[in-house]
Image: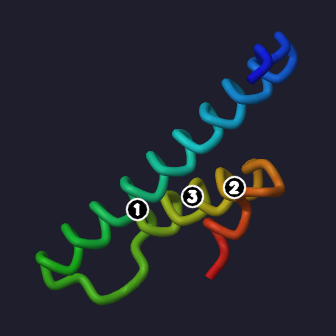
């Protein structure tokens, strides 16, 4: 197998950075949702809306081949 080019490595690093951002945003949203549900909160709070927007925006920044992860 040939050695990947510097460009390919940079693209791989950037893809991983974007995936990590999206995973982090999703995890924060899910943790917050669990905390609010445990507290009996049944409406969309300002914090929920903020975290949901952050997760949505992080999903939009994913490379095209990974965007299916953020859909649905």
Query: Residue 66 in the image: x percent, y percent?
Result: 71, 57
Query: In terms of depth relative to the viewer, which is nearer, 66 or 51?
Result: 66
- Which residue in the protein does label 3 denote? 55
Q: Quadrant of residue 55?
A: bottom right
SS assignment at label 3: helix
Query: Residue 60 in the image: x percent, y percent?
Result: 76, 57
Packing grade of label 1 (10 A; few <14, some 14-19, many >=20) is: many
Name the quarter where the N terminus is drawn. top right
Query: Residue 34 in the image: x percent, y percent?
Result: 23, 72
Q: Is residue 50 left or right of residue 37?
A: right
Q: Are marks 2 and 3 in contact (CB under 8 Å)?
A: yes
Name the quarter where the C terminus is drawn. bottom right
- Which residue in the protein does label 1 denote? 29
SS assignment at label 1: helix
- Which residue in the protein does label 2 denote? 57
Q: Are marks 1 and 3 in contact (CB under 8 Å)?
A: yes
In the picture as drawn, the residue positioned furthest to the top comes out as 6
Sequence order check, earlier mark of 1 and 3: 1
Sequence order check, earlier mark of 1 and 2: 1
Q: Is residue 36 left or right of residue 1?
A: left
Q: Are marks 1 and 2 in contact (CB under 8 Å)?
A: no
Q: Is residue 44 left or right of residue 1?
A: left
Packing grade of label 2 (10 A; few <14, some 14-19, many >=20) is: some
Query: In terms of depth relative to the viewer, which is nearer, 69 or 40?
Result: 69
Residue drawn at x 82%, y 10% as measured from the top left: 6
Query: In terms of depth relative to the viewer, which is nearer, 55 or 11?
Result: 11
Distance from disc 1 to disc 2, alpha carbons, whole Å, reads 13 Å
């Amino acid at each position: 197998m040939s050695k990947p080019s510097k460009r390919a490595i940079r693209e791989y690093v950037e893809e991983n950075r974007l995936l990590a951002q999206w995973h982090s945003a999703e995890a924060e949203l899910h943790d917050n949702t669990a905390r609010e549900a445990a507290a009996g909160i049944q409406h969309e709070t300002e914090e929920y809306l903020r975290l949901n927007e952050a997760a949505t925006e992080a999903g939009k920044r994913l490379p095209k081949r990974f965007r299916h992860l953020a859909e649905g």
